[in-house]
Image: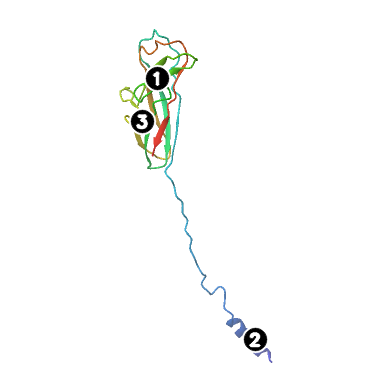
């Protein structure tokens, strides 16, 4: 065979092989998904009324701060439990003496307004909000009424549960 024939056969052989660059690629797809659930977190600072004696006549006021963080656009309601002292209700809270044998209690109230007129409980006086994915601060206004200090000298305490329904 001559050189020209060999060259022609080689060119034809190469031309008959499909080119990889000339074909269309096969394609497919896949989904990328994420589910964001409603969620809320809550924390609170202690309400410390301090040290007082029975001679004090005015109200003893203090505050606590509740921090609520809920996912964006999540509606929530914050309720305050009655407290752990026996006989407590949403509207009649008491701190119990911590010394054994002391059955005295100190009456106090928790409110959702600075004027201390709207009791904050589990049914009435709850506070509603909508989450923004950031910390939202709510103030609890506390008051020990005059005359509540006619008790045995002691340290008095109650524990209130903060509930966030969403």
Q: Quadrant of residue 117?
A: top left
State the residue in front, 39 or 20. 39
Q: Where is residue 163 in the image (x, y as percent from the top left)?
A: 41, 33
Q: Disc 2 on helix, strand or loop? A: helix
Residue 94's disc is 1
Q: Position of residue 120 (x, y in %)?
A: 35, 27
Separation of marks 2 and 3 at Cα, in angstroms: 95 Å
Residue furthest to the bottom in view is: 1
Tag on residue 122?
3
Please state the horizontal and vertical placement of residue 94, each as a whole percent of the image. 40, 19
Q: Which residue in the structure is indicated by mark 2? A: 7
Instruction: Answer with the quarter of the image where residue 66 lies.
Output: top left
Q: Which of marks 1 and 3 is nearer the N terminus?
A: 1
Query: Which residue occupies the foreground of this view, 44 or 104?
Result: 104
In the image, residue 10 above or below residue 130: below
| Viewer-side residue, 65 vs 157 | 157
Q: Distance between the residues labelled 1 and 3?
A: 16 Å
Image side of residue 15 versus residue 141, left or right: right
């Amino acid at each position: 065979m001559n050189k020209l024939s060999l060259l022609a056969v080689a060119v034809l052989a190469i031309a008959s092989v499909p080119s990889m660059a000339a074909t269309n690629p096969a394609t497919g797809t896949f989904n990328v998904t994420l589910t964001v659930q409603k969620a809320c977190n809550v924390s609170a600072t202690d309400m410390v009324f301090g040290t007082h004696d029975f001679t004090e006549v005015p109200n003893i006021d203090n505050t606590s701060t509740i921090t609520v963080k809920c996912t964006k656009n999540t509606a929530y309601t914050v309720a305050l439990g009655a407290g752990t002292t026996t006989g407590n209700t949403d509207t009649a809270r008491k701190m119990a003496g911590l010394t054994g044998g002391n059955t005295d209690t100190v009456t106090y109230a928790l409110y959702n307004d600075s004027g201390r007129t709207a009791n904050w409980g589990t049914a009435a006086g709850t506070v509603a909000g909508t989450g923004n994915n950031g910390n939202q601060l709510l103030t609890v206004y506390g008051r020990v009424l005059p005359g509540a200090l006619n008790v045995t000298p002691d340290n008095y305490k109650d524990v209130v549960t903060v509930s966030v329904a969403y």
